[in-house]
Amino acid sequence: ILKWAQAIGLSGDLRYRHEWIDQEDKDDRHRHRIRLRLNVSAKVNEQWDAGLRLATGSKGDPVSTNQDLGQAFSDKPVWLDAAYASYHPDSVKGLNITAGKADVPFYAAGRNQLIWDHDLTPEGICAQYGLELAPKSKLLLTAGGFWVAENATEADPALWGIQGYLQQSIGTATLVAGLSYYNFTHLKGYTALNREWDGSTTNKFFGNSSTGGRFANDYDLLEVFGQLDMNLAGIPISTFGTYVINTATEAGFYEDTGWLIGLKVNKASEPGSWELSYDYRDIGADAVVGQFNDSDFIGGGTDGKGHRFSAAYQWAKNVQLGLTYYNNTITRTAQDIGYDRLQLDLVVKFK
């Protein structure tokens, strides 16, 4: 009877987290946090889809959907985390165009967060195209333009990105190798981006170089990445790495580069299954835009190095336990600062 309901899909997840942070120059911090995300998808017709996502968060932070518990049992805010329409024309197989606010469309080897935080949802238009080159070889291309800020008196900062990578199957293994180029326009000389969303008069550059309360550099990022997935003795194993350099700054070699290598063993999917992962990264002050990369590593931003250890156990269908430990060093100060962060998670998915 309700034919329209057949075209609507609902899904989401709830995460409960206990977090401990030990930063060398600050008191230890313990906090409990929740993250709730609700996805609504709609099939408009055979060539068009639309969707939106509501999520918890604090002050509209673009790289966090966590909400701290406490605050005298106060109600928690819910934000519009994504809203988009997508077009996949029958006339061009493998093409998909998305307009609106959506997840980062660019591939990240090993789902790393060296350049983009997983919670970030850029706003603009992008196109993705997949082309079969051979039965076991595929070329994937992504390009898009995203609006970072709008200002009536200054040129508007924007992000233009293009990425291409080859996916090649070799027996039971799969190799991915590719390049990305991200061009931030009008960022040099612009005010701190945190003032766009938190209502603060305090400038936060998250490790990036600044002068006079404004960005000291532009950010034109060239990334090289690769990933190898294989199966050893029935256990899936993935190794991955990425390297990025900001070609728009005259800072020293260390300050404008960042890199990450990692390993993942097994996959937590079926009840009773598990996975382990590890990565090490070293990221210079102006290698990437600190507002948009991993908000957990070194407390967010750039100019740091260190390890990330992670484990997950599939407790039941759609219920997972997780543990993540960061052992990092913040290098943006005159003296290095030790930074440790432990996260214990319970994740419940629904659909």
Image (cartoon, rainbow, N blue to C red):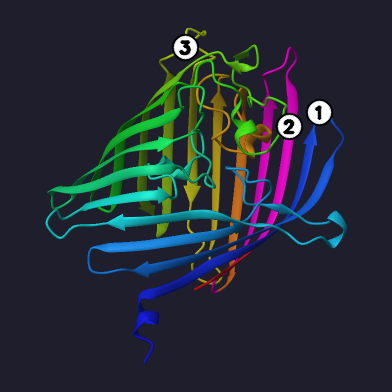
Three-letter residue code for mark 2: Tyr
Query: For the residue labelled by badge 2, is the local secondary structure a helix, a strand or a loop?
Result: strand
Percent position of residue 190, x then y? 54, 20
| CA–CA distance in space, label 2 to label 3 | 27 Å
**Numbered circle sitting on residue 24:** 1
Placement of the N terminus among the 4 image quadrants: bottom left
Given residues 177 and 148, the one toward you in this image is: 148
Viewer-nearest of discs 1 and 3 = 3
Residue drawn at the location 67% of the way across and 18% of the way down: 332
Percent position of residue 211, x then y? 62, 11
Q: Do tag 2 and tag 3 residues touch (Cβ < 8 Å)?
A: no
The residue beneath circle 3 is: 249
Three-letter residue code for mark 1: Glu
Does the segment drawn in magenta span residue 331? yes
The residue beneath circle 2 is: 339
In the shown orientation, is residue 286 left or right of residue 144?
right
Q: Is residue 268 above or below residue 202?
A: below
Q: Main secondary structure of the magenta part?
A: strand
Given residues 273 and 290, the one toward you in this image is: 290
